[in-house]
Amino acid sequence: MTDHTSTPARRGWKFGHRATPYVFAFFMASIMAMLMCLVITAAHAGIDEAYLVRVLEAYLLAMPVAFCCVLVVRPLVLRLVALTVHPPG
């Protein structure tokens, strides 16, 4: 039986491990910005027929800002975690 998960065609689309902080920041920012836009838009303007349009308009600004913020605060967060969590082993 052939293991298809290790074929070059399957791995070819992935980024190298050095991209991990940036890929993490992208996904974290994308998800958190969307969640925050959904909640804040609903809290400020309510949920009506224009709700999703307002959410997407807010997201256009929020996502790039969140991405930059995650990149900037990541080193601080890593230090704080190291100060408050015992290392494995």
Image: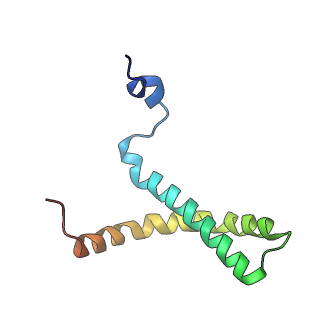
Residue 61, percent from left and from top = 67, 67
Q: Quadrant of the C terminus?
A: bottom left
Give the farthest residue toward the right: 49
Residue at 50%, 33% in the rendered image: 13
Protein image colouring: rainbow
Residue 3 vertical placement versus 16 (above, below): above
Q: Residue 42 versus residue 67: which sits nearer the camera?
A: 42
Residue at 19%, 69% in the rendered image: 86
Residue 72 vertical placement versus 30 (above, below): below
Across the whole image, how many numbered discs are drawn on residues? 0
Residue 18, percent from left and from top = 36, 46
Q: Is 42 situated left or right of 3 in this image?
A: right
Q: Residue 60 versus residue 8: which sits nearer the camera?
A: 8
Image quadrant where residue 47 sits? bottom right
Give the farthest residue toward the top: 1
Residue 43, percent from left and from top = 70, 82
Q: Residue 88 versus residue 71: which sits nearer the camera?
A: 88
Residue 63, percent from left and from top = 61, 64
Q: Is 19 situated left or right of 42 in this image?
A: left
Q: Is 52 situated left or right of 74 in this image?
A: right
Residue at 77%, 65% in the rendered image: 52
Residue at 53%, 63% in the rendered image: 29
Give the farthest residue toward the bottom: 44
Give the farthest residue toward the left: 89
Image quadrant where residue 41 sits? bottom right
Q: Quadrant of the N terminus?
A: top left
